[in-house]
Image (cartoon, rainbow, N blue to C red):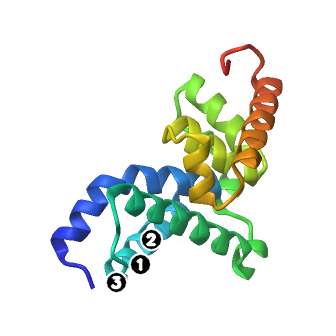
């Protein structure tokens, strides 16, 4: 079990990354908050010794993605309708950001992960391949296909 200081440092350092990954996968603020807490609880209870800061960050990314996938596959999630959809309140985001975010969120899951890691976390394809445990060429293919899909959805050449 980790100390309170270690937990506080990890939250300060990785909170934004974990929260954004949760929102990209779950598209729901409350589910994202639940997974956020779950990820940091796993960290506090974990006895994993990290080789470096990059190893620790990769651990947070992998655990977050897995927790989001677990929630997405759960019986409860598949058999209920989110309250957000019932209320259908428009998102309170800036126009440009909301349009891009909506386009990224509409991508299939395999593309969302690589787009997030490449454009938001600024990982290279080689680093992404290690994190996601996929072939580097697969990552390049997924990035190219996701760029093409985003161009179709958003128009323009801003991804070049």
| Quadrant housing the N terminus | bottom left
Question: Image point 64% across, 50% down: which residue?
Answer: 113
Residue 39's disc is 2
Name the residue that disc number 3 marks: 47
Who is closer to the viewer here, 48 or 8?
48
Could you tell me how many numbered marks the image carries? Answer: 3
Of discs 2 and 3, which sits in the foreground? 3
User: Which element is circle 1 on?
Assistant: helix
Whole-angstrom CA distance, mark 1 to mark 2, is 5 Å
Where residue 76 sits, quadrant-wise, is: bottom right
Is residue 27 visible in the rendered image? The answer is: no
Question: Image point 79% across, 40% down: which residue?
Answer: 141
State yes or no: discs 1 and 2 in contact (Cβ < 8 Å).
Answer: yes
Which circle's residue, 3 or 1, is located before the other in the chain?
A: 1
- Residue 159 lies left or right of residue 53; in this view the side is right
Name the residue that disc number 1 marks: 42
Whole-angstrom CA distance, mark 2 to mark 3, is 14 Å
- 114 vs 41: above or below: above
From the top left corner, tell me how far across and down residue 133 is, in percent.
Answer: 64, 62
From the top left corner, tell me how far across and down residue 34 is, in percent.
Answer: 48, 70
Which circle's residue, 2 or 3, is located before the other in the chain?
A: 2
Mark 1 Cα within 10 Å, few/some/many (few <14, many 20+)? few
User: Which element is circle 3 on?
Assistant: loop
User: Which element is circle 2 on?
Assistant: helix
State yes or no: discs 3 and 1 in contact (Cβ < 8 Å).
Answer: no
From the top left corner, tell me how far across and down residue 31 is, in percent.
Answer: 55, 65
Residue 62's disc is none
Mark 2 Cα within 10 Å, few/some/many (few <14, many 20+)? many
From the top left corner, tell me how far across and down residue 36 is, in percent.
Answer: 45, 65
- Residue 18 lies left or right of residue 25; in this view the side is left
């Amino acid at each position: 079990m980790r100390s309170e200081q270690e937990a506080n440092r990890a939250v300060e350092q990785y909170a934004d990354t974990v929260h954004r990954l949760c929102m990209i996968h779950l598209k729901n603020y409350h589910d994202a908050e639940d997974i956020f807490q779950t990820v940091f609880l796993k960290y506090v209870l974990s006895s994993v010794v990290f080789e470096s800061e990059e190893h620790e960050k990769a651990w947070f990314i992998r655990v977050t993605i897995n927790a989001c996938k677990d929630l997405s596959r759960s019986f409860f999630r598949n058999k209920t309708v989110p309250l957000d959809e019932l209320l259908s309140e428009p998102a309170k985001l800036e126009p440009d950001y909301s349009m891009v975010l909506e386009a990224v969120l509409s991508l299939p899951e395999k593309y969302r992960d690589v787009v997030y890691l490449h454009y938001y976390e600024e990982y290279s394809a080689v680093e992404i391949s290690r994190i996601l445990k996929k072939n580097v060429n697969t990552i390049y293919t997924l990035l190219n296909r996701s760029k093409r899909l985003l161009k179709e959805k958003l128009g323009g050449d801003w991804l070049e």
